[in-house]
Amino acid sequence: MAHGPLQGVKVVSCSTAQAGTVPYMLMADLGADVIKIETPKGGDGSRGMTVLPGMGSTFFETNNRGVKSVTLNLKEPEGRAILHKLVAEADIFGQNFRPGAAEKNGFGWEELRKINPKLVYVSISGYGTKGPNGHLPGTDSMAQALGGIAEAYSMPGQKMRTGIASVADESTAMLAFGGALAALHHARTTGVGQKIELSLLGSLVRLLGWTFTTTMWRNKNPVTGQARVTGTAERPGISASFNDRDGKPLVFQLTGPEDWQDAMTSLGFLDALKAKGFGHLGVIIDNDAKREELLALLDELFATGTREDWVGKLRGADIVSAPINTMLEASNDPDVIANGHVTHVEHPKHGKLKVHGTPWRFSETPAKPGIAPELGEHNDAVLEALGYDKAAVGDLKKRGVI
């Protein structure tokens, strides 16, 4: 089978960190030819992040697998000239430096569009370019803090905090991936390229989805904690988590009164709940005291059995339920493994490594995860393809251009 549906797509990326690299790593998974530009001395700073003894950087490997590394000193005119030659042949260009830096270093939108009018130019910033802080650098934790997701995962009475998973970075990467391919379709149809701007903050706001809309329409912060209560008194819904007798957590989600009856009957809880006035879930809608009373009662009931048993009974009644996994448990979950969400690659230095799979399954052009490149690994091949002979490449290395 052909490797990936993006064969023939050429990408050049002057990007670092996570949001700026993952879009093009995903494209490489799908067969695109992706060239990552790095500085000759040291390269992408994330090569030195989260380095495990004898294993290299989990951060760099995860975010840059399958791409080619070419080193260029963009402070040198010859380095910029090489970049411009690569851009002339590219379909997509990406950068995620703070506003203004790309223009100073020879890869701003106005400069590159003159070289390649069909170019799709993806620019990622922290805050967006129009607000009062658009000139500042941004990070995942900054976007989590400003965007509201800290509240989404908070518990009443506890401090809000940003999480360890880079949800702003990854959300931005997914949106950049889709936006770039949408613009590429337009460029191939019309012959006209364009610039796409995204921000960590804007992507995080989008990630909050309907919950953010509800907050705006109500002009009131959402109720947080172990349960998410939705709907009306007539058509209530709930998503809630509880611990079993061994402290192992689980979750279930209900979308109507019928689900409540079926779920509580399957668990053997319905009679006890009716005795306390909770035969219908609608009594907790807009009633904080009733909600807390119900959750406390369910805490007691779930603490009488095992997670495996509770989840099995709920699923048997066609109720959505699952154990709440730690990250390590998630990496070994049978559905994660069976569907290839986690897979293995053969690494020339480290042997068989467990890595992310790809989120898509293409019937005709399957994705193929690669490995991250050594710094400057593809200098010779890429430059020779541009017309530089071995002597010229050697001279560029000697003078620090590459």
Image (cartoon, rainbow, N blue to C red):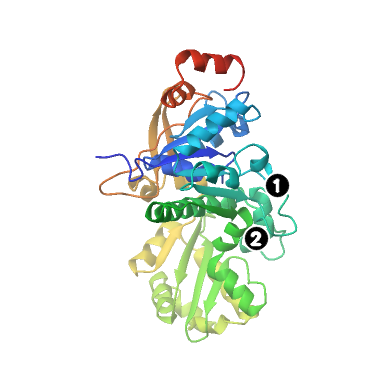
**What residue does disc 1 label?**
137
Q: In the drawing, what numbered circle is on residue 147?
A: 2
Kindly identify the residue that appears in the image at 66 percent across and 29 percent down. 75
Which amino acid, by three-letter code, is at mark 2?
Answer: Gly
User: Badges 2 and 1: C-beta atoms under 8 Å apart?
Assistant: no
Q: Is residue 73 visible?
A: no
Question: Looking at the image, is mark 2 or mark 1 nearer the viewer?
Answer: 1
The quarter of the picture where residue 154 lies is: bottom right
Considering depth in this image, is 30 or 288 the residue closer to the camera? Answer: 30
Which amino acid, by three-letter code, is at mark 1?
Answer: Pro
In the rendered view, would you say 203 is above or below 343?
below
Q: Residue 97 location, x and y as percent?
A: 64, 43
Q: Is residue 376 visible?
A: yes
What crowding class fits label 2: few (fewer than 14 Cα within 10 Å), some (14-19), or many (20 or more)? many
Kindly identify the residue that appears in the image at 38 percent across and 71 percent down. 266
The quarter of the picture where residue 152 lies is: bottom right
- Element at badge 2? helix
Q: Residue 247 location, x and y as percent?
A: 54, 55
Considering depth in this image, is 176 or 211 the residue closer to the camera? Answer: 176
Q: Residue 71 location, x and y as percent?
A: 55, 26
